[in-house]
Image (cartoon, rainbow, N blue to C red):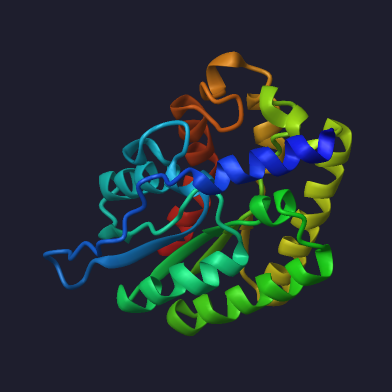
């Protein structure tokens, strides 16, 4: 029964299509940093609006600090895996002529049963492709924990979910460190926020707008320091 529920929710997630930013924004100032956010529901802001997503909030925050940056594209889509990012997001990253990128992906690889070996290979390929465009101007964000959220029951035992997501994050962190890329650890913060009802979206699975704002507070200082 648990497996049937997991398959059903996976199908639901794949059918969700948050409005990704497929059109490339063109800054008026040619000296503007061209930022592209690569990811899934967590980057497009599922559970809130795209304007309330952490990449949008981050861009506005950096602009307020007189850093010339524009989120020229956010092709992230709810339900997408590393393979989806390779197939559908990397082409737009190239087209956008990006100077800087963030990457938060992997939860759907776990949900869809991708094994750790395959995930490791796919994540490596994804980093290769992103770095071809932005070199070291890439910041990695680890997968948040959703195991204590109301909808987590559709994925199995919450203890197992948390443990398995930790292993995926270990892969992400190891690969980032091998490339000397900055890593922002979201897992522990998400666990704290998930204890508060106002930090959970109505679907019982994604962060609320308030939670995305808290994520941005963690993410901002690292990226602000990198871009200065």
**213 versus 122 height, above or below:** above
Q: Residue at x 44, y 28 (%)?
A: 209
**112 versus 101 height, above or below:** above
Measured as percent of width and height from the top left, residue 4 is found at 77, 38
Measured as percent of width and height from the top left, residue 186 is found at 64, 43
Asked if residue 144 shows in the view, the reply is no
Q: Residue at x 54, y 31 (%)?
A: 207
Q: Quadrant of the C terminus?
A: bottom left
Q: Quadrant of the N terminus?
A: top right
Task: Answer with the quarter of the image where residue 122 lies.
Answer: bottom right
Q: Residue at x 30, y 67 (%)?
A: 33
Residue 4 horizontal side relative to residue 218, left or right: right
In this view, the residue in front, 95 or 226, is 95
| Number of marks in the rendered image | 0
In this view, the residue in front, 164 or 196, is 164
Measured as percent of width and height from the top left, residue 129 is found at 53, 80
Q: Residue furthest top?
A: 197
Q: Residue at x 32, y 55 (%)?
A: 21
In this view, the residue in front, 55 or 202, is 202
Residue 28 horizontal side relative to residue 108, left or right: left
Asked if residue 17 shows in the view, the reply is yes
**209 versus 93 height, above or below:** above
Measured as percent of width and height from the top left, residue 130 is found at 51, 76
Task: Answer with the quarter of the image where residue 178 lies.
Answer: bottom right
Q: Residue furthest left?
A: 28
């Amino acid at each position: 029964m648990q497996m049937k529920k997991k398959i059903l929710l996976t199908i639901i997630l794949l059918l969700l299509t948050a409005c990704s930013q497929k059109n490339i924004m063109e800054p008026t100032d040619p000296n503007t940093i061209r930022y592209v956010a690569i990811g899934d529901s967590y980057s497009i802001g599922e559970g809130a609006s795209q304007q309330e997503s952490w990449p949008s909030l981050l861009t506005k925050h950096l602009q307020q600090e007189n850093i010339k940056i524009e989120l020229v594209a956010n092709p992230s889509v709810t339900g997408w895996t590393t393979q989806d990012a390779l197939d559908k997001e990397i082409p737009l990253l190239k087209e956008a002529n990006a100077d800087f990128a963030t990457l938060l992906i992997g939860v759907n690889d776990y949900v869809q049963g991708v094994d750790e070996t395959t995930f490791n290979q796919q994540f490596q390929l994804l980093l290769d492709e992103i770095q071809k465009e932005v070199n070291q101007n890439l910041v990695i964000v680890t997968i948040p924990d959703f195991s204590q959220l109301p909808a987590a029951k559709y994925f199995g035992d919450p203890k197992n979910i948390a443990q398995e997501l930790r292993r995926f994050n270990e892969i992400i962190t190891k690969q980032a460190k091998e490339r000397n890329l900055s890593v922002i650890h979201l897992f522990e913060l998400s666990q704290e926020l998930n204890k508060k009802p106002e930090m959970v979206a109505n679907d019982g699975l994604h962060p609320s707008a308030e939670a995305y704002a808290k994520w941005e507070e963690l993410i901002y200082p690292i990226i602000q320091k990198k871009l200065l």
